[in-house]
Amino acid sequence: MYKAKESYSMWDGMDLRNWRDDLRMTQVTLARALGVSHRMYCYYESGERDIPKSVELSLRYIKKNREEDDQGTLEGQGTLAGTLTAFDRERISRLCLAIEGFDCSDAEGDRLLRQSLKEIDYLLSKFPE
């Protein structure tokens, strides 16, 4: 299967490590926030695997939200943690539409369905019960 080079980040493992250090997060915590396994995150950070563009974009999104959260807390506006952002709501909506169109008669469709459901579960886990 051919993978387009555009689907991978120009970052290397050290860039990923520096961003993680800036966020003051452990590998496990950041991997969970990115929606990847700890083992896969370790592969990315050690340089054993190419870093997908989606991981880079997700990390930028996490950092942006962390900065906005810190800014809101400093200004006495409370914290943004535990709420779904407009991006999260839009992502859930798009995933639900995609799930409706999945053909689960083959292994690839079944894998995509499970992956989409995991992502929805992750997004909803950010919302307090």
Image: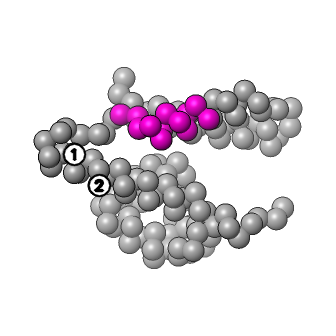
Q: Nearer the viewer, residue 91 or 16?
A: 91
| Range of residues picked out in magenta | 83-94
Q: Is residue 80 left or right of residue 118?
A: left
Q: Which quarter of the figure has residue 91?
A: top right
Magenta-highlighted stretch: main secondary structure? helix
Residue 6: % across, % down = 68, 67
Q: Which residue is mark 2?
A: 67
Q: CA distance from mark 2 to mark 1?
A: 9 Å
Residue shown at the point (31%, 66%) measured from the top left:
22
Residue at 63% across / 35% down in the picture? 95
Asked if the residues shown at circle 2 and circle 1 are in contact, with their CB atoms under 8 angstroms apart, the answer is no
Q: Is residue 121 above or below residue 74?
A: above
Residue 62 vs residue 122, the one in the foreground: 62
Q: How is the image coloured?
A: one colour
Residue sitting at x 84%, y 61% = 1
* Corner quadrant of residue 119: top right
Q: Is residue 9 above or below residue 29?
A: below
**What's under tag 1, amino acid-wise?**
Gly
| Label 2: how many Cα within 10 Å (few below 14, some 14–19, many 20+) | few
